[in-house]
Image: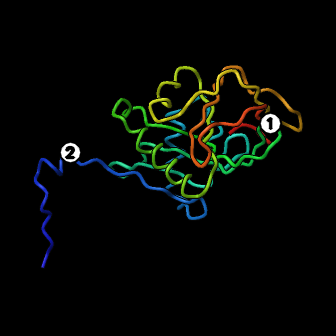
Amino acid sequence: MATRDRRTLTERAVSKPQPRVVDEAGMPPELDAAIRRNLCRAHPDGAETFRHSRSWHGSFPSYSAILEENGDVTAHVGVVDRAIAVGGAPLRVAGVQNVFVVPGARGRGLSAPVMELAMSEARARGYAVGLLFCVPALEKVYAACGWTSLGERETVRVEDGRELPLPGKNIVMFHPLAVREFPDGIIHLEGNDW
């Protein structure tokens, strides 16, 4: 006997798709291709990189939080597992990368549930904090998801073996997980930014 959907037509019409977590080790090739395709759409300035890989500056996500609608990835957050140093002490961070909502779906509040799931998963996996880099125009978007700017913090990245400052256009933001307050001191990314 077929099971009847007991929700009303109105309830079915307003139910939103739910985001899900996909581990990198189990990433199906067709899902990888869909994420890369939509990264190119959302970030045309990085399209040359995203046509071939979801890595940014050599950093691959450990997992992704995705939201799918009509058979396509509408929103995405990648999370990099990185051990950094802050004030000389180690800190394990969930580095957020490759955030997008496809152009036709923006303004519908889709970034919040994907980001919330990504950070909930990071908390469950034992990360100390979430860390991301954004341009000033996106600071309010991340702040609405519980992220806090670290202000004028010296942040060092490593590119081609050289220690360099984080580009001035970037704002460093953190999300509390196991650690509620971001530690004091110079942030050393122990690699390039992601």
Residue at 42%, 32% (x, y): give it.
103
- Residue 171's x, y, as percent? 63, 25
Whether residue 120 is visible, yes or no, is yes
- Residue 139's x, y, as percent? 53, 25
Name the one closer to the observer, 9 or 119.
119
Residue count near mark 1 (Cα–Cα under 10 Å), binned few <14, some 14–19, many ≥20 = few
Label 1 SS: loop
- Residue 175's x, y, as percent? 56, 39
The residue carrying mark 2 is 14
Label 2 SS: helix
Q: Is residue 135 left or right of residue 111?
A: right
Q: Is residue 33 left or right of residue 6?
A: right
Residue at 20%, 45% (x, y): give it.
14
Name the one closer to the observer, 75 or 47.
75
Residue 87 is labelled as 1
In the image, residue 113 sits, relative to residue 20, either above or below, namely above
Q: Amino acid at mark 2?
A: Val
Q: Are marks 1 and 2 in contact (CB under 8 Å)?
A: no
